[in-house]
Image (cartoon, helix red, strand yellow):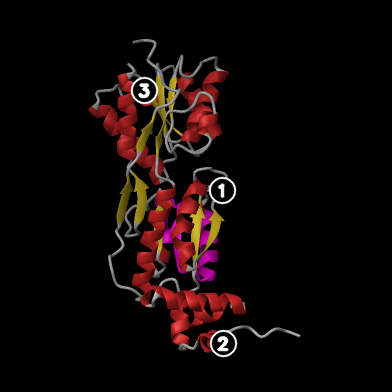
Amino acid sequence: MVKKRVTLKDIAAEVGVHVSTVSRALDPALSDTLTPEVVTKIRDTADSLGYRPNRIAAGLRTNRTMTVGVMIPDITNVIFPPILRGIESVLEPLGYATIIVNTDSEAERENRLLNVLRDRGVDGIIHAAVLLSDPCITHAAEDGVPVVTLNRMVENSRIPYVINDEEAGVRGMLQHLIGLGHRRIAHLAGPQHLSTGQLRQAAFRKVAEELALDLDERLIVEASRFDEAEGRRAATDLLASGARFTAILCANDRLALGAIDGLAAQGLACPADVSVTGFNDMSFLELIRPRLTTVRIQQYDAGRTAADVLLKLIAAETGTETGAEAPLETILPVELVIRDSTARCADS
């Protein structure tokens, strides 16, 4: 015999309140309109009766599915779990479920997965894999889908973004290397079709000029991906160029680890022969030797911030709340983390 599904009316009858009161008590966004005692009593009763909300029916009434799409570029990159935890720490208590998709930073795959999320009727999208020029996500935002980009931005668009203070990170790292006596500093730049790679290279060029460093173009090598294989390849190309350098500032940690490996393959030790730095401060760096000097970005807090901005966009789109408008730009502070991969320049 099939057990009858418990409804809001059943809970209301059990507690002795109106159905609308039960509805508000069970909605995390509206429960603060009731006294804590009433909310507790209704929720306890719902649990004891075995109530399960009918999300499909609720979605038909409110035109919301209580789902959010989260797009990431590389599911194997260890910087994303803290970011995802930050996102869920904001959304899950409010009843949202996240749908995570991995784009591999491929435009065609991103477009396909974006359409999948839109077909699922997600209430909004947090996009941490967006390309610098990205018409697909721009069109989605223009169609009314609430979108926030995280760690990256789309040029010439009004899509809100949460990024790191790239220039401050590069400036602090260059000043650290100069303080150790390094003047010939190379840069392993990230992919230039991504705003992260472009912004960090632009910051390197700007700050290097301000600090009167020699901007030898042979000392700037662009990677096609943010991974170890490209770090090894780029370090090998640096050595093959014949340009002299004593330090390498890499656009992320994975490039830095690959560069250290590439230098070692050519008989060069880090930091005795070449100092190497990263960017992001991903997990487990403490366990890898030499321990990497890097720029720490806010990973968990970046996820929380992006989720907060998205909720403001959703509220504005549905007209369910009034309050602070979602900011177009949010720049998060960074922190220099000095470890073992940098040392005083032997030439100095």
Q: Residue 39: in sight, yes or no?
A: yes
Q: Nearer the viewer, residue 250 or 37?
A: 37
Q: Nearer the viewer, residue 5 or 243?
A: 5
Query: Residue 10, labelled with which disc?
Result: 2
Query: Residue 75, labelled with which disc?
Result: 1
Residue 77 falls in image quadrant = top right
**Quick check: is 185 in the magenta stretch?**
no
According to the image, label 3 marks what residue?
185
Instruction: Please state the extent of the stretch shown in magenta in the rendering.
Output: 108-137
Q: Amino acid at mark 2?
A: Asp
Q: Nearer the viewer, residue 259 or 313?
A: 313
Which is more N-terminal, label 2 or label 1? 2
- Element at badge 1? loop
Which of the two discs, 3 and 1, sits closer to the camera?
A: 1
Distance, label 1 to label 2, CA atoms, is 43 Å
- Contact between marks 3 and 1 (CB within 8 A): the answer is no
